[in-house]
Amino acid sequence: MERWAGRVAVVTGASSGIGAAIAQELVKKGLKVVGLARRVERVEELANSLESASGKLYSLKCDVSKESDVREAFKWVKSNLGGINILVNNAGVCDFNTLTDGPVQKWRNIIDINVLGLSICTKEALEIMNEKGVNDGHIIHINSITGHGTPFNFYMYSASKHAVTALTEGLRRELVKKNSKIRVTSISPGSVLTELGEASGIPKEVLEDFKDNPFLEAKDVADCILYVLGTPPHVQIHELTIKPVGEPM
Ligand SMILES: NC(=O)c1ccc[n+]([C@@H]2O[C@H](COP(=O)([O-])OP(=O)(O)OC[C@H]3O[C@@H](n4cnc5c(N)ncnc54)[C@H](OP(=O)(O)O)[C@@H]3O)[C@@H](O)[C@H]2O)c1
């Protein structure tokens, strides 16, 4: 990880759960981290708690489903920090809904954030990397085990994460064609104890089904990020699946 100290990482959805843990671990490793979220005050609080770390956390308000917000955020990163070396596309929602009833607005929200938000952030980051001649950058998508099968009955969420699987391989191939050394990785966690269930408005009776299941901690996923970043520049971890021991799915 030493080679990343002093370099710039953008982490989307840094106000909670996995994104907050990733931002924290990267700051501890000496990186300049820009944490994007709508609840920017939570990123600011995290930044204050990390003041004695070797790196620094910057907070920026950004709704990744709004292209103008994303453009502004990356413009800020370029002007104030000189470029970007790592993008962690973590922001995501699950939103409880069904395929038979919708509501359609919830489907749209999932796709706007989990698929289009991730894609727009990726495009913006790559543009800056290319402009600044960063040829050893790293794009990391926080996917899910639901991006490789349908273990839970959150089907639109699962569809959005299957899209992330396709986008990971698609981006890898496009980068190879361009002879780029920028790496792309998908990290697919099983169940992680975060605010996702609550934030998704999942009914209590549905959450009950999970109550006896084992969970990972957000830091376990952050450790995966440190691992994939820490591999030598010629190594690309394409897909990393992490489950809690005993996960039934
Ligand atoms: N928890 C799990 O079991 C699990 C398993 C596999 C994969 N994942 C994936 O891990 C990622 C993080 O989820 P989590 O479990 O840490 O959930 P979480 O605690 O609810 O965190 C979600 C994060 O995404 C951000 N976010 C949501 N909508 C956004 C938007 N429109 N613009 C910007 N940021 C937005 C939230 O920030 P604001 O609300 O402040 O904007 C928050 O920081 C997601 O992609 C999720 O699909 C989670």
Image (cartoon, grey):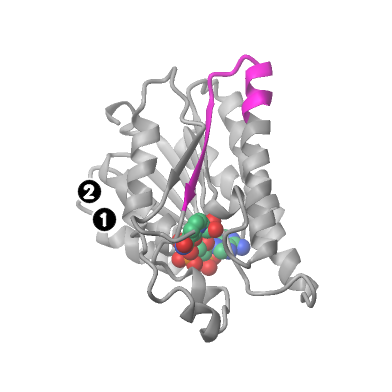
**As drawn, 82 above or below 111:** above
Q: Is residue 184 magenta?
A: yes
Foreground: 182 or 211? Answer: 211
Residue at mark 2: 53
Q: Report, in whole angstroms, how far the alpha carbon at label 1 lies from the one at label 2.
A: 5 Å
At label 2, the amino acid type is Ala
At label 1, the amino acid type is Leu
Cβ of mark 1 under 8 A from ligand 1: no
Question: Residue visible at 30% across and 31% down?
Answer: 1
Residue 178 is situated, as x and y percent measured from the top left of the image, at 67, 17
Cβ of mark 2 under 8 A from ligand 1: no
Quarter where residue 55 is shown: top left
In this picture, which residue range is highlighted in magenta? Answer: 172-189
Q: Tell me if residue 240 can be seen.
A: yes
Residue at mark 1: 50
Residue 159 is situated, as x and y percent measured from the top left of the image, at 69, 55
Question: Residue visible at 55% across and 20% down?
Answer: 133
Q: Is residue 176 magenta?
A: yes
**As drawn, 77 above or below 50:** above
